[in-house]
Image: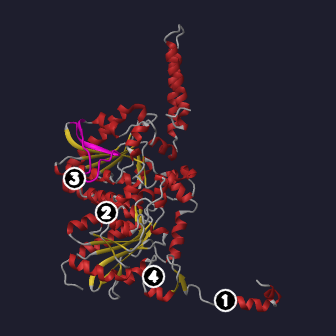
Amino acid sequence: MNPNFLDFEQPIAELDAKIEELRYVGDDTEINIGDEIIRLQDKCRSLTESIFSKLTPWQTSQLSRHPQRPYTQDYIDRIFTDYQEIHGDRAYGDDKAIIGGMARLGGRPVMIIGHQKGRDTKEKIKRNFGMPRPEGYRKALRMMKLAERFKMPVITFIDTPGAYPGIGAEERGQSEAIARNLFEMSALKTPIICTVIGEGGSGGALAIGVGDRVNMLKYSTYSVISPEGCASILWKSAERAQDAAEALGITSERLKELGLIDGIIDEPLGSAYRDVDLTARNVKQSLIESLDNLDKMGLDKMLETRYQRLMSYGRYTEE
Amino acid sequence: MSWFEKLMPSRIRTESTNKKGSVPEGLWTKCDACNAVLYRAELERNLEVCPKCNHHMRMGARKRLEAFLDESQREEIAANLEPIDILKFKDSKKYKDRIMQAQKATGEKDVLVVMKGQVKTLPVVAAAFEFKFMGGSMGSVVGEKFVRAANVALEQNIPLICFSASGGARMQEALFSLMQMAKTSAVLQKMAARGVPFISVMTDPTMGGVSASLAMLGDINVAEPKALIGFAGPRVIEQTVRETLPEGFQRSEFLVEHGAIDMIIDRRDMRDKIAGLISMMQNKPAA
């Protein structure tokens, strides 16, 4: 088992390894194995296509937190220019699970805010596995207020398992910090475009997720609770996470059907990490399109639309 | 059963057990905190606060509003809103069945009960969470009812008071329930912008998505004594940090100490204290 691949990806990983091996061998033998490589590559592609054409919600959930999935910084590097990172909430500290700063998107100044996960163990700990504490949300809010003051659109990237459940986080007012962001974002006088790039975990995600456009990458997820958390509460066993993933409807496709998100951003075959540059180009295009549409709307209408959309969330009957 | 009772004819035995059973159910209640045996009627007169140790027991939504509002001119708002199972959610039970059971057990259509009325003659809109309805969980109906409550407050420029008691978002409504956090916070933003007071009263327990939205956004945040208030549940935190939690962690007193809430109010003083606050916030003479 290759730990960099998920269990359902293992057949693809094995074929990939075989192709690599053949390439290596190919250098010093007389036999022409080019045809064999091409044949294997075709096989690999059709295998990937068939696996990815019938992904279960649970598999999508695993993909959304794939160890190789691109993170916020990967998109910042590829989409924007002139990025300058901003730090701190001016009250307690600098939460490294949320990063951001000013940059240019096609020349235009914008404010970027996103959850950041770590790649290796050291980095994972530094980023607290992408789980923000109150100072993270307050840092994000400070950046949003800056953006409002200097008329920059806010662009957020959502990728978190959720808010950090720790003693200090509670002591410093986790609930209030999240609530305050929802409150402020609902009326922030500048366009807000939110993109779920990986895991959209509950309140921790929503705290930078209220905006004029909410888009999701194809294999990202957005949920009120993690499938494991839901399973352990409702099924009394985390083992039932697959059932929970199914029931919660956490995939981009399902959420689009339900009218809870605006758009789905396409990912390359085999998901985002297979071609990060291409994924980033897709994200960039979606950001530019969203921003153009919001510009045409004008601030007042945009704010009213944002508010009415928030009010429209929910399904109920009234006799 | 003693050897002597065993010897007795069965007819007499039945009579004796019948006598024991003749004490009506629910006449006496035990306080969860101090174990004192309390007379039910007296406890109710004391608004479900233990007269021996001042422990604030959980109180039903309707009872709470009736205790809080003046008797005259009460009018329920959006009483007919009902939940639907949009996702066909099924865990060990169907969500649809859970709704039906909760409705039968509580007599409410969903968690939130909203009334327009008066507190010591000051007009207000008051909302209360029914914790016995699926743990006071916030789904679409709670969000919508809260917004309707706020809209009445906005239209009539009268304060909104909300008593929360909730485990958090309602998982069976999945992302719809998460979005209720944004919805309720947005309407509170509108109230704040227009200067219409919102008093949030957190009662035991106020957790998760409710705590991280409407409950923490009061112009004044109030809590009842010793209520459990927080974002993540104590068990989840313990499992994550693998430490024992400090004494009184996530209780009202802890929250005052850490600056998260403004004050703790004893339930029996709630009417007076809140009437005092809102009359000042709206620059009206003391009620």
Q: Which amino acid does label 4 sit on?
A: Glu
Residue under pointer 3: A145
**Crowdedness of circle 4 by 10 Å Cα count: few (<14), some, many (20+)?**
many
Can you see residue B95?
yes
Based on the picture, tell me whether residue A88 belongs to the magenta stretch: yes
- Residue B187 locus on image (x, y percent): 29, 65
Disc 3 and disc 1: Cα gap in Å? Answer: 68 Å
Hey, what amino acid is under mark 1?
Answer: Lys
The answer for how far apart the CA atoms under marks 2 and 3 are is: 17 Å
Q: Give the range drawn in magenta.
A: A81-106
- x and y, in percent, of residue A278 in the image: 36, 32
Residue that badge 2 annotates:
B185
Q: What element carries label 1?
A: helix
Q: How far apart are marks 1 and 2 (CA)?
A: 53 Å
Chain bearing mark 2: B
**Can residue A260 be seen here?**
no
SS at badge 3: helix
Foreground disc of the pair 1, 2: 1
Image marks 3 and 1: residues in contact by CB distance under 8 Å: no
Q: How crowded is mark 2: few (under 14 residues within 10 Å), some or many (20 or more)?
A: many
Q: Nearer the viewer, residue A21 or B84?
A: A21
Closer mark to the observer between disc 3 and disc 1? 1
Q: What element carries label 2?
A: helix
- The C terminus of chain A lies in quadrant: bottom left
Write down the residue under mark 1.
Answer: B20
Q: Nearer the viewer, residue A155 or B135?
A: B135
Quarter holding the N terminus of chain A?
top right
Real-space Cα separation, disc 4 to disc 3, in angstroms: 45 Å
